[in-house]
Structure formats: C-alpha cells, structure tokens
Image: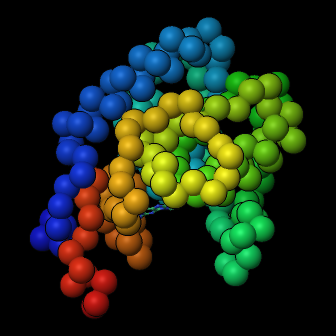
Amino acid sequence: MHNDIEKIYVSENEINDMLNRLGKEITNDYKDRNPLIIGLLKGCLPFMSDLVKKLDFPLTLNYIKASSYQGIESTGFITIEGKVPDVKGRDVIVIDDILDTGRTLDSIRRVLVEHGANSVELCVLLDKPEGRKFDIHAKYVGGPVPNEFVVGYGLDYNEHYRNLPYIGVLKPRVYQK
Ligand code: 5GP
Ligand code: MG
C-alpha cells in the first residue's frame, strides 16, 4: 500500500496538529451547545473518530451516506441513502474528508436546514479551494491541498487507501492497473 504512494502531502504528525487545533476551536464554540455531529460516510471515518476524542463535552453522533447522482453533476444533485437524522432544533456540525467543488456539502447543508436544524457548520480535514464551484464555506478546516487527487485517512481510490494514516498522491502506475 505505502509503495503505491508517490508523495506525502500531509503527514501523520501534521494531521495530529490539525486535530488538536480543530478540537480546540470546536470546543470553544460548542462546549455548552450539545451539538449533533454528523459524519458523511465513508470518507469521514478516520477523521471523525479521531476528532471527536478531542471534544470533551456533551455531544451526540450520527451519520449520513450520500452519493452523487451520476450524469447530472452540474445540477448539484446528490441523494441521501436512508433516513435523514433528526436535526430539529440542533446545532449541527457536518464532518467530511475534503471540500472540493462543494456540491456534496452544499446539498447536505440545505437538507439539514430544511429539516429544522438550528444551525449547520461544516468541518473538513482538507480543502481544495481551486476546485470550488458552489458558494460554500467550511468554518473548520484542517488545511489546504493542491488541486490533485489525494488518498489516505478516509480518502479512497476505488475504495482502497482509506486506512493510510497520512494523505498522499498515488503513483501514476496505480491508475494504469
Ligand atoms: P465535492 O462535493 O466537494 O466536489 O466533493 C466532495 C467529495 O468528493 C469528497 O467527500 C470526496 O469523497 C470526493 N473527493 C474530492 N476530492 C477528492 C480527492 O482528491 N481524493 C479523493 N479520494 N476523493 C475526493
Ligand atoms: Mg466523500
């Protein structure tokens, strides 16, 4: 697995620093608000699991599995599999691995507001500002990455590499398999 990585963009240590900083920021803002933390499966898994351990105050957890609707990307449609969590009156923080075009988080945010959330903020480990197509802002961001396809720490290529403890880019030969 490690052999397939061309270059590491965010090391384990850097991820740790990001987690500590985000943990402090979110604690500052939410320690008395009993927030509902919603992760977007499956990319959120390592990040969410590590981040919530830095939040030492009352909160609840849930998840959404969203998939983008093939072929109509430009219309901004995504579908949510299953039931939308009960967010009525809750202060929600949505967690995802990366903010690229913004399509996913823009749609999810809208749905949660429609379902009666009191507030919705977004938290992503990585931001690709150059990829943005939707007017959307994440309040909590670990750090930026260049406009390249990255894997690791939740981010997959054909469902693999999510378990890498760092973020990197794949060697070209991996795509030729
Ligand atoms: P957006 O809706 O912002 O365009 O894209 C968000 C989703 O696209 C992420 O949750 C992630 O699943 C996928 N994505 C965007 N950029 C990358 C990337 O560089 N690597 C991987 N593995 N997935 C990405
Ligand atoms: Mg994803």
Residue furthest left in the image: 3
**Quadrant where the image shows the N terminus:** bottom left
**Residue visible at 27% across and 29% down?**
17
| Left or right: residue 117 compared with residue 163 | right
**Quadrant where the image shows the C terminus:** bottom left
Residue furthest front in the image: 130
What scheme was used to colour the molecule? rainbow
Badge count: 0
- State the image coordinates of residue 15 (x, y, percent, origin top left): 28, 38
The answer to whether one can see residue 1 in this image is no
- State the image coordinates of residue 117 (x, y, percent, origin top left): 80, 31
Indicate whether 151 appears above or below 96.
below
Indicate whether 57 appears above or below 23.
above
Taking depth in this image into account, of 112 and 75 the one nearest to the observer is 75
**Residue visible at 40% across and 59% down?**
147
- State the image coordinates of residue 83 (x, y, percent, origin top left): 77, 53
The answer to whether one can see residue 12 in this image is yes
**Which quadrant of the structure image shows residue 59?**
top right
- State the image coordinates of residue 31 (x, y, percent, origin top left): 56, 11
Indicate whether 119 appears above or below 2.
above
**Residue visible at 82% across and 38% down?**
113
